Every structure is written in C-alpha cells, then in structure tokens.
Image (spheres, rainbow, N blue to C red):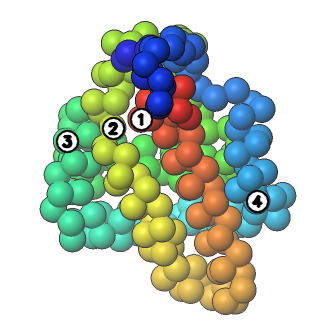
Amino acid sequence: MNNLIQLVGEDAVTPVAALSGFPVTEEIDLLWRIGLFSSDDERNLRKLWRILKGQTDDYLDMVFGMVAAYPALATTLAAACRENLGDAVDGSTAVRSLFREWLSETCRTPREPSWLKRLYSSGSDLPSERSMETTLAKLPGFRYLIALSFPLVATLRSLLVGAGLAHQEIERMQSAFLKAVLLQVALLSKLYVREGTW
C-alpha cells in the first residue's frame, strides 16, 4: 500500500500515517453512537440470538439460496471461502461453523467483534503491508458487503415470524441486527479504503 496521497487541488504529495490496524475503542464507540446503537438494541440482539441459535443452519441455507441467485456474488464468495477454508460456499462444516460464530458474536457481543479483529491482526497488532494485501485478496469485493447488509437482515424475518413474535418485536430485532451489520461493515471498510480516508 502506498503511504503517500495526492491532495486534491495541490501539487504536493503529503505522507500519511502508516496503517494503524483495528480501530481504537474511541473510534468504535463514536461509530456506535452515530449509528444510534442503544442498550435496547443490545437487548434485542441477545433475544434474537436465543431464537436463532438453534436455527443457524436454516438461516444459512436461506442466505446460500439468496447468494446462489446472483452468479457473480456466488463466484466471489466461493473463491473467498476456497482461499480461506479450502471449501466452496456449499454448506460445508467449516463455512457453517464460521457463519454460526459470526452470528453469535454479532448478537451477543456486537461491540467486541473478535472475528473482525482477527482479520486485522493476523498475529500482530500492526499487520504488515504484505499481510494486509493477503487479507484483502481473501475478502469479497466491498460492494458486496454493502449490498448484502439489508438482505442478511430481511432473510431473518421468516424465522422470526415462525417463532410467533409480534410485529413490533420483529421490527426491533431486525433494526438492531441491521445496525450491528452496518457498523461491522463500517469497521471492515478500513481494510478497503485508501489510507488516510477512513
């Protein structure tokens, strides 16, 4: 990665700080406040997990079905899974285990996404330029992360309706889940955007 950025409207090239790794707590807290994530949202996510923990395979099957409807997305995610796990996105045990971990952490500890921290660290607090490039090569295109945010949330609805929840309760859970997913995408975006612009 280049640590020099051409400033708009200026001829000079200005050095920027080296990649700082995972965002610091203050940056994360600010994102949560800006995203209007509240203690009510945390409670709703914990309720959501109690409903979903026994249905993660059903949820993942619905997500796989949605992904399969878009060949470009299916190809991208299959390549990312093969690179990371040696498996295609076909319902393998490894993919299901990672999905279950992501869902559990998103619902139970949304402010401490350890799976996301692992993407940044790869064994150290300040990943090298080479390890960051390797990490990015394993991730799907950023546009897919943004585009998938709402469908991941909307897909939950049938499982929540099947649990016999009231409409308002479903709305609160989906809203909390969408906020958590979007804030994760905001944290992931630091891996994708040019240094100094995050």
Q: In whole angstroms, how far apart are the C-alphas of marks 3 and 2?
A: 9 Å
Mark 4 crowdedness (10 Å alpha carbons): few <14, some 14-19, many ≥20: few
Whether pointer 1 and pointer 2 mark residues with C-beta atoms closer than 8 Å, the reply is yes
Q: In screen coordinates, is 82 left or right of 154?
A: left
Q: Which mark is residue 139?
A: 2
Residue under numbered circle 4: 36
Specify the amino acid type for callout 4.
Leu
Q: Is mark 3 on a helix, strand or loop?
A: helix
Residue under numbered circle 1: 192
Going from N to C along the chain, the mark reached first, 4 or 3, is 4
Q: Residue furthest right?
A: 39
**In this view of the protein, which residue sits in the foreground, 164 or 65?**
65
**In this view of the protein, which residue sits in the foreground, 125 or 142?**
142
Specify the amino acid type for callout 3.
Ala
Going from N to C along the chain, the mark reached first, 3 or 2, is 3
Mark 2 crowdedness (10 Å alpha carbons): few <14, some 14-19, many ≥20: some
Image quarter of the C terminus: top right
Residue under numbered circle 3: 79
Specify the amino acid type for callout 2.
Leu
